[in-house]
Image: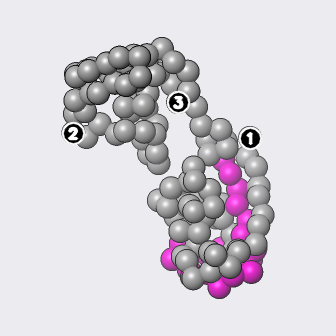
Amino acid sequence: MNRVEEWSVESDLAGLRLDQAVSQKYKEISRTLAQEMIKNGEILLNGASAKPGQKLKGGESISLTLRSEEVESVITATPLDFKILYEDKYIIAIDKPSGLVVHPGAGKEKATVVSALLGHTRLSP
C-alpha cells in the first residue's frame, strides 16, 4: 500500500538538489532511488514535476509517494557461501568476496552479507 507524505523544505536543506534533500530526510531512500522516484512523478515539487538536480531554496512543498517497498523493507535470510575467518558470541569476521553487496539497497535486495549473516546466525532483522 502506498503512502503520501507532504512536507516543506527546511532551511537546513536549502541549497541542496531535490534528490539529495529527499535522501537526507528519508535515510531509507538512496539518492539513486530518489532520482528514479522524481523521474516517475512520485516526488513532486510545489505540486508539479521536477528534475532531480533542481536546487531548493527553502520553503518549497514536497509531495512524496512512498511505495510499499520503501515503507516497509524486510531483510530475509539468504544462504550464501563465504569463508568465516573468526566467530564468537560477539563478532563474526568474514572473507567477503568482491562484488558481494554488504546490505540491501536500491536494486539489490537479496544476496547480501547482512542477509547471509542472518541465515548463518538464525537471528531475525
Report if the CB atoms under discs 3 and 1 are less than 8 Å apart. no
Q: Which residue is mark 2?
A: 98
Instruction: Compute the Cα span from label 3 to label 1.
Output: 18 Å
User: In the image, residue 69 lies at what x, y percent?
Assistant: 61, 41
Q: Which residues are magenta?
A: 46-67
Q: Which structural element holds mark 1?
A: loop
Q: Quadrant of residue 49?
A: bottom right
Q: Which mark is residue 75?
A: 3
Color style of the picture: one colour
Residue at (49% x, 61% y) in the render: 31
44 left or right, relative to 16? right
Judge left or right: residue 84 versus residue 45.
Answer: left
Q: Viewer-proximal residue, 83 or 38?
A: 83
89, above or below 111, in the image: above
Q: Position of residue 62 (x, y in %)?
A: 72, 70
Q: Are marks 2 and 3 in contact (CB under 8 Å)?
A: no
Q: Can see residue 3?
A: yes
For image coordinates 66% across by 47% down, the residue present is: 67
Query: Which marked residue is nearer to the observer: mark 1 or mark 2?
Result: 2
Looking at marks 3 and 1 on the same chain, the residue that comes earlier in the sequence is marked by 1
Which residue is at 51% across, 25% downward?
76
* Depth order, front residue of 11/71: 11
Could you say which disc has been placed on residue 36 in the image?
A: none
Mark 3 or mark 1, which is nearer to you?
Answer: 3
Residue at the far bottom in the pictured view: 57
- Along the horizontal axis of the image, is 27 left or right of 6? left
Give the answer, above or below, for where 29 lies relative to 90: below
Disc number for residue 1: 1
Identify the secondary structure beneath mark 2.
Answer: loop
Instruction: Note whether residue 36 is visible.
Output: no
